[in-house]
């Protein structure tokens, strides 16, 4: 199996962390590519030319991080990304975290076509909802990865690290002590350490 990825993409990191938490890191070849570079094998895996994209051993090209995670959960059910017990609460937290990732990615992309995006009313909405999502997680943080390596915990770690990576001038965790303590407890987790974003 090949996972097309890059070193900055938070969507790719969701999949890369989940893969490691399931103990399958050796079952997959990660290929770092430039999604703007027209790499032919990658285009076969994802017609939309975005990372992550998975090419399975039987030649199925699966893109969209959420769909790849569904495939992964069937392929290796434990530890569960979507645990049967408390599923609603896990998905509610995951929605806040994945939504925060979407908002940050939207800001980065929108800045490319509109340098004033941050002050545009759409930009202001994006930053407002990003803060609201983190506030919600502050009030109801996920379980630690050591307890439950579920989609809420993985997505929260990816969102917090992406916020620090892309928006380093903002103190995201200072005003959110519960989330700060939560992230500190995940320090040293191999799945996170091996996938920290870098340019
Ligand atoms: N909804 C997709 C989003 C994937 C995505 O936007 N990936 C970005 C990198 S973070 C990308 O490849 N961008 C290249 C492009 O937009 O052409 C997912 O969940 O996988």
Image (tube, grey):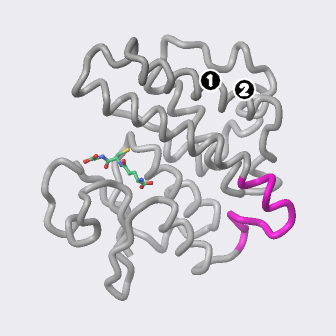
Instruction: Work out whether residue 41 or residue 185 is closer to the camera in this orientation and state it.
Output: 41
Instruction: Work out whether residue 11 or residue 124 is closer to the camera in this orientation and state it.
Output: 124
Q: Secondary structure at mark 2?
A: helix
Residue furthest to the front in view is 121
Residue ID for mark 1? 131
Question: What separation in Å lies between label 2 and label 1 (alpha carbons)?
Answer: 6 Å
Residue furthest to the bottom in view is 58
Along the horizontal axis of the image, is 66 left or right of 42? Answer: right
Check residue 183 in the rendering and tell me which mark sits there, or answer none.
Answer: none
**Figure check: 79 above or below 176:** below
Instruction: Give the magenta-colored segment's residue range.
Output: 78-91
Near mark 2 (Cα within 10 A), the count class, few <14, some 14-19 or many ≥20, is some
How many marks the image carries: the answer is: 2
Quadrant (top left, top right, bottom left, bottom right) of the N terminus: bottom left
**Figure check: 50 above or below 175:** below
Near mark 1 (Cα within 10 A), the count class, few <14, some 14-19 or many ≥20, is some
**Is there a contact, CB below 8 Å, between mark 2 and mark 1?**
yes
Q: Residue at x 54, y 13 (%)?
A: 170
Quadrant (top left, top right, bottom left, bottom right) of the C terminus: top left
Residue ID for mark 2? 135
Residue 86, quarter of the rendered image:
bottom right
Q: Secondary structure at mark 1?
A: helix
**Figure check: 97 above or below 163:** below
Q: Residue at x 43, y 70 (%)?
A: 28
Q: Main secondary structure of the magenta part?
A: loop
**Under 8 Å from ligand 1: the CB of mark 2?**
no
Q: Position of residue 164 (x, y in %)?
A: 53, 24
């Amino acid at each position: 199996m090949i996972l097309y990825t890059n070193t900055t993409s938070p969507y790719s990191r969701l999949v890369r962390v989940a893969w490691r938490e399931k103990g399958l890191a050796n079952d997959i070849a990660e290929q770092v590519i430039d999604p703007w570079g027209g790499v032919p094998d990658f285009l076969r895996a994802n017609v939309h030319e975005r990372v992550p994209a998975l090419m399975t051993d039987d030649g199925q090209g699966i893109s969209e991080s959420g769909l790849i995670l569904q495939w992964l959960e069937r392929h290796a059910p434990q530890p569960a990304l979507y645990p049967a017990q408390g599923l609603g609460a896990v998905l509610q937290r995951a929605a806040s975290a994945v939504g925060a990732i979407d908002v940050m990615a939207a800001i980065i992309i929108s800045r490319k076509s509109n340098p004033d995006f941050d002050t545009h009313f759409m930009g202001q909405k994006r930053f407002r909802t990003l803060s609201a999502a983190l506030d919600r997680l502050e009030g109801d943080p996920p379980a630690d990865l050591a307890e439950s390596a579920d989609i809420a915990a993985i997505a929260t770690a990816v969102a917090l690290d992406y916020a620090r990576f892309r928006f380093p001038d903002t103190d995201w965790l200072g005003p959110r002590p519960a989330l700060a303590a939560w992230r500190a407890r995940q320090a040293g987790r191999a799945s996170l350490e091996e996938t920290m974003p870098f340019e």
